[in-house]
Image (spheres, rainbow, N blue to C red):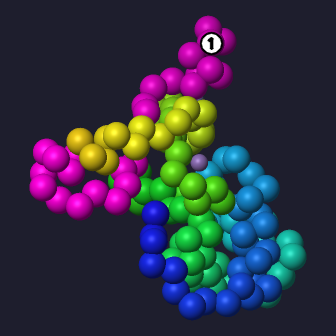
C-alpha cells in the first residue's frame, strides 16, 4: 500500500469512481469501471478513468492488483487483505483471514531489508468451478 499520500483533492469524478469500486466485490478491470462510471458521467473518457484510478491509488483510497496479466484489477478496499484467484474462471475473491504481520519481520530478518507490507494470493478453483456441473 502506498504510505506516502499526496495532496490530491477528492474531485467529483474521483468520488464517483470510488463509489463504483466500493460497491462491488468483484475486483474489476478499468474497462468495467469505465462502463459503470459512464452511466453517471456520460462524456468521461477511458483515459480519464485510468488517470483517476492512478491518483486514487496514490491517495491510498484503492489498491491496484496486478497478476502478471495484461490488465490490472482494482480493489475499493485499501486495507491489507489476501486474495484468492480462481485458475479456471479468473475471478478474484477476498480471503477472510487475518494478515500475518509476522511475515514482514521474518522477511526483514531473511534479507536485512526494511519490509513495509506483503501481498499474498492463493490460487486454485473457486466453489462454482470445482462443483461437478
Ligand atoms: Zn472459478
Ligand atoms: Mn480485495
**Residue interval drawn in magenta:** 107-133
Question: How dense is the environment of label 1, judged by Cα within 10 Å: few (below 14), some, or many (20 and up)?
Answer: few
Q: Residue at x 52, y 86 (%)?
A: 6
Q: Give the quarter of the figure containing the C terminus.
A: top right
Q: Position of residue 128 (x, y in %)?
A: 65, 22
**Is 97 positioned to the left or the right of 123 in the image?**
right
Q: Is residue 95 above or below residue 31?
A: above
Q: In this picture, is 92 found above or below 115?
A: above
Image height check: is 78 above or below 121?
A: below
The answer to if 109 sits in the magenta stretch is yes
Where, by quadrant of the figure, is residue 51 drawn?
A: bottom right
Task: From the viewer's side, name the closer residue of 98 and 133.
Answer: 98
Element on which disc 1 rests: loop
100 above or below 17?
above
Query: In terms of image quarters, where does ligand 1 lie?
Result: top right
Residue 71 appears in the picture as rendered? no
Residue at 42 percent of width and 38 percent of height: 100
**Residue 127 visible, this angle:** yes
Q: Residue at x 31, y 48 (%)?
A: 104
Residue marked by disc 1:
131
Q: Is residue 80 magenta?
A: no
| Left-right relation of 40 to 89 | right
Amino acid at each position: 500500500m502506498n504510505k506516502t499520500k499526496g495532496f490530491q483533492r477528492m474531485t467529483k469524478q474521483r468520488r464517483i469512481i470510488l463509489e463504483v469500486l466500493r460497491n462491488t466485490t468483484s475486483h474489476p478491470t478499468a474497462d468495467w469501471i469505465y462502463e459503470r462510471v459512464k452511466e453517471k458521467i456520460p462524456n468521461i473518457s477511458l483515459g480519464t478513468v485510468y488517470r483517476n484510478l492512478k491518483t486514487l491509488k496514490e491517495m491510498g483510497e484503492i489498491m491496484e492488483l496486478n497478476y502478471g496479466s495484461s490488465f490490472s484489477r482494482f480493489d475499493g478496499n485499501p486495507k491489507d487483505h489476501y486474495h484468492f484467484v480462481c485458475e479456471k474462471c479468473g475471478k478474484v475473491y477476498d480471503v477472510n483471514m487475518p494478515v500475518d504481520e509476522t511475515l514482514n519481520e521474518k522477511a526483514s530478518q531473511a534479507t536485512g531489508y526494511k519490509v513495509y507490507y506483503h501481498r499474498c494470493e492463493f490460487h486454485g478453483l473457486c466453489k462454482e468451478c470445482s462443483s461437478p456441473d
